[in-house]
Structure formats: structure tokens, C-alpha cells
Amino acid sequence: MYDTADTIAAITTPLGESGIGAVRISGPDAYAVGDKIFKSKSAVPLKERRDRSIQYGTIVDENGTCIDEVLALIMKGPHSYTAEDVLEIQCHGGREALESILQLILRSGARMANPGEFTERAFVNGRIDLAQAEAVMDVIQAKSRAGLTSAVSQLEGRLSKVINKTRKDLTELVTRLEVMIDYPEEDLEDIAVPDVSGALQEMQEKLQHMLEESQNGRMIRDGVMAAIAGTPNAGKSSLLNRLLQEERAIVTDVPGTTRDVLEEWITLRGVPVCLVDTAGIRETDDTVEKIGVSRARRYLDRADIILAVIDGSRPLTDEDKDILQSAADKNVIIVLNKTDLPSVMTSQDLSTYGFPICPISASTGDGLEELKDRLLQEVLKGGFTDGPSALLTNTRHIELVRQSAEALERARQSLQDGMPLDCAVIDIRQAWDTLGSITGDTVHDDIVEEIFSRFCLGK
């Protein structure tokens, strides 16, 4: 952990040209540092001014030169983001103004904050737990409304409440088992063991349900990759442009125009979807095109959904068949393109592959809304959590829940097999300890440091 006795500072807004920029100071000497550089009509020290107030003034350097006209926000601990005394200086958003003010603050007694250190102090000071702290970055990095809603829900403690309730229930189960261990003469096993075993199974099923829904959580947070695949001139780039509603990819009648991978994001009903336009897949002697085809095949392996674009104005080619056959075990939507031209192939001709088929014209836009609806259906298979349970979106949380569920299964199996009660207690305690790592109650310092090192500077 960093030294929380220090007073830290950092720019909290992106550097560039904007109307407003902000520099945050947090720590025991935040107001003492501020008094050295902030000047206003009032001579009252900042520490003695009203909490949660905004003060107008100027920032001046050691020579008395005015750097900028600013607003100073006073947020006294523990009722601040870090639970410490916080002074936030809002100035004009130019790079020079922000960096000059920050350098002056550092010369006046504060030190540069490390990445994530403001949020880490909020965690260390008990204002938020570790799961809520991680949700801060999810809010910042949210790619969609659904992702933002999920992150805010976790920031408000929805996941933490579920985890804390489960750990409390596990504590009660351990207590019951330890009573049986300490008082064997009472002959309590026949009565209590089935109840404990049933409770363990119920908790294990809840955790397993969270794991099953974690795929939806990952999609909400990180988005879904939809690879647009097909032979040259099937209309892949035209489809991408239609879905994006802009001319993003080059479209020509020359086969093999797309030689690299092009990624663009759209949002379908709050879910971010990364559309990947790939090179046309075919046998070729062109060295550059070969590289593009190889990359296209790699993306087909990685994609969550494949949009297999088939040119309906010509017969099915061997390359078309190869694409559909190689994707037999994947989530595929066949996009039967060029319905604006005389049809040589119909949906019935492609029905033997067992994939949903969407006839469209990427040229005119006919069938595009039906394709979006079908794509959304594939994305939302299984549905999203919309109730009291918590949606797992963080890879670290998913792994810890998985380990906890496995420990509960071992404990339940021990009880069913008639093994000594101590064996079950060990596994239950392991589950309790592992779940505590999600909220930070039982996490090691090195893991905490690694988590906060991913944060942006100023947060």
C-alpha cells in the first residue's frame, strides 16, 4: 500500500482543450497546500471555510503571478470521495493551465498520485469495498448504456450485498458444524447434517447460476464480437457500412479489396457489438491477400457470432461451402445478400446448414432491420439478469465465485460420504475466504496493488 499519510494530487480530467479542467488534492495537508496557492477576497483559511462549498479565486505562483481564475471545491473528510480532506480546483481546461497548477501544487507540499490512488484511499478508508472500487473503472470504461447500468449497480454495492449475505450464511453453517464437533455426545449429526448439506447445495446453486449468467455480464461489459465473413465481393464491406450507417469500408467491384481487418462498434439495445469486416476468404497467390485471409480465419475462431455473407445472385461456391462447414459448431447467421438482384439461390437452398438465414440487400438496406433483430436475438440468448441477483462482469470475480462453488461442492460431498465434519468445515471456510477476496475483506495486499495499478491517473 502507498503511504496514506501523504497528501496527493493529480489532474483528474483528460489533457487537451476544453472549457473546464480539474486538479484534485487529497490528504491531511490538502487545505494547507491550497492556502499557499489559492487567493480570494476572504482571508479565512480553507480548512475553516464551509464544507461542500465552492470558493471563487485565483491560483498564484511563488512570485505572485496569476496562473488562472478558478473555483475551489471544499470536501472535508470523511464525507468525500477518498474519505479524506479533498480540495478540487476547477480551472480552464487547457493543458498549460492544468499542468502549471499541478506543478505548483507539487512544489507546495503534495506528491503526485499513483494510478488509482484516490480510489485506493477510498477503499483503505472503508468508504467502498474492493468490488465497488473495481466498478469505478467499469463506469469510466462502459461501452454502452447497459454496461453503464451494470457498473453503477455494482458501484452501489449490489454484488457486495449478495457476497456478504452468502458469507454470513456460511459463517452460520460453520458454527453449526463446530457445535457438533465440540459436543459429539449430544448426537446432533442425524438432525443437523442433512440441513447443512441442503443449505450448502442451495448456496452452491446460487453461485452456479451467477456463473452461468457471467457470459451475459461479459457481453454487457466488454461487448460482443461479430465477424463478417464471406468470399470476395459477397458484400461484406457494404454490410458493415449499412450497419454503421456511414461509409467506413472501401467498396469496389474488384475482388479482394479488403485485405486487412476493420473493427467498428455499434450498440444494439444497450449491448455493444464489435463488427469485424474481414478479408474475402478464398485461395489466392497474392502474398498480401493471403495474410488477410489468414487473419480472417483467426477472427472466425475468436468471434462470438459469425455473419456469413452469401451472394444470392450467384450459385453457392466451394469457398462458401467451406466457410459454412468450418463454422458448423459456432454461432452463425447466414446473411443472404443482394436480394435486389435476380436470385439464383434461396433460403431453402441454405437450410441444410441449420443456421438462421436473413435475406437482405446491403445495397438498398432492405432486410437490414430484420438482420439487426436476429443479431440481437443471438446476442441476448439466455437473457440478462434483471432482478435481485448480481451480474458478474469481472474476470477476477468470476474465477473467485467458481472456486467458491467448487469448495462448497467438496464440503457437501464430504457430508454425504460420512467423512469427518472437520473436512467439510475446511472447505466451507475456504469458500468463505475466497468470496471475501471479491469485496476485499480477505484479499492480499499484492492483489489490491495489482488491481489499482490498472486505474487511470487521477482516479
Image (cartoon, rainbow, N blue to C red):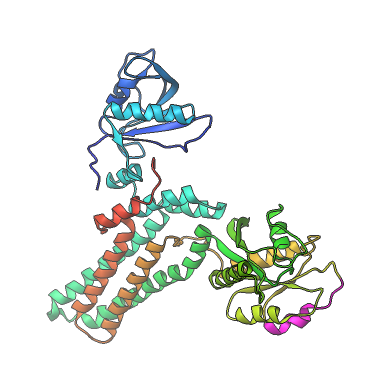
Q: Position of residue 271 (x, y in %)?
A: 58, 58
Question: Per the image, is 345 magenta?
Answer: yes
Mark count:
0
Residue 440 shows in this picture: yes
Q: Is residue 314 magenta?
A: no
In the displayed structure, 414 sits above or below 235; it is below
Is residue 112 or residue 360 the one in the foreground?
Answer: 112
Name the residue at 35% across, 19% down. 61
Residue 269 visible, this orientation: no
Q: Quadrant of the C terminus?
A: top left
- Asked if residue 228 is positioned above or below residue 101 in the image, the reply reads below
| Residue at horizontal 60 percent and vertical 74 percent from the top | 331
- What's drawn in magenta, residue-wise? 342-353
The one nearer the camera, 151 or 283, is 283
Query: Left or right: 290 with respect to 112?
Result: right
The spot of residue 252 in percent (x, y) is 76, 61
- Quarter occupied by residue 49: top left
Q: Residue at x 39, y 40 (%)?
A: 458
